[in-house]
Amino acid sequence: MEPIQKMMDELNLENNIKMEDIPNIDLYMDQVIQLFETHFNDSKRNQEEKVMTKTMINNYAKGKLFFPIQNKKYSKEHIMLISMIYQLKGSLSINDIKSVLDQVNQKVVEEEFNIGDLYHCFLSLTRQNVQKFQGDILESEELVKQEVNMFADDKDTNYLEQVLMITSLVHMSNLYRKLAEKMVDQLSVEKQEAGKKDKNKT
């Protein structure tokens, strides 16, 4: 098996759109797509994969994942939200993402909320997550090697090690996704309860 550290390095996990990468002027959709393609091109599984498309952005807009654009242009705040959506879409449905970002969008529109502060925290956490992920993966690799020792006499030990590593990674991913979905459901419950309280006040 190819060294797992080498594979992680090839994933370019630290690729992200930083605050300073986002222009201070509003962008047309094609410019938004180009911005994402530029920063995440090295993270694609293959050259045929698209980082961002017009259809994706239109679906996000129709699903109300971000507040409405003006004059067919996307502001810096929109880019930050789309960047967060880009990370969320790997594990959550559009409806779940809407639940997560609904109040953020409302705060931006109604309270002049500085989403830049939230995005700064998001970027900080992603950097720390990458470091933790790399350490966890190397630890998992050692556990898999211990388990695969029982197949020491098998000519396909390398293959079996890869199968166990892949299944372990997918299982770990599922655990994180399930907890994230549970938290999304909790957000929906809290929103419903808040709505009932507001009705009772009137």
Image (cartoon, helix red, strand yellow):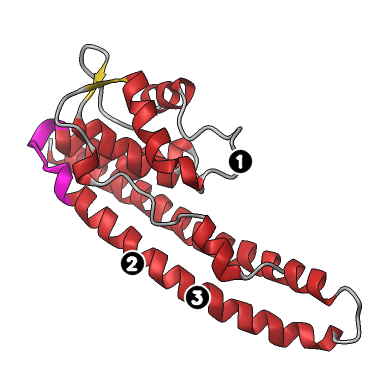
Front one among 167 and 17: 17
Q: Quadrant of residue 191?
A: top left
Residue type at mark 3?
Answer: Asp
- Label 1, on which residue? 46
- Label 3, on which residue? 136
The mark total stands at 3
Q: Which residue is drawn at 33% across and 27% down?
A: 32
Q: Residues within 10 Å of mark 3 (few under 14, many from 20)?
A: few
Q: Quadrant of residue 200?
A: top left
The residue sitting at the left extreme is 112
- Magenta span: chief secondary structure: helix
Q: Residues within 10 Å of mark 1 (few under 14, many from 20)?
A: few
Magenta stretch contains residue 103 = no
Task: Indicate left or right for 8 with 62 as reference.
Answer: right
Task: Indicate left or right for 198 with 90 as reference.
Answer: left
CB under 8 Å between discs 1 and 3 = no
Quarter of the image with the C terminus is top left
Whichever of labels 1 and 3 marks the residue nearer the N terminus, that label is: 1
Residue type at mark 2?
Answer: Gln
In x, y percent, where is residue 126? 34, 59
Q: Element under label 3?
A: helix
Quarter of the image with the N terminus is bottom right
Whichever of labels 2 and 1 marks the residue nearer the N terminus, that label is: 1
Whichever of labels 3 and 2 marks the residue nearer the N terminus, that label is: 2
Q: Residue at x 23, y 48 (%)?
A: 119
Give the magenta-colored segment's residue range. Answer: 109-117
Residue type at mark 1?
Answer: Asn
- Label 2, on which residue? 128
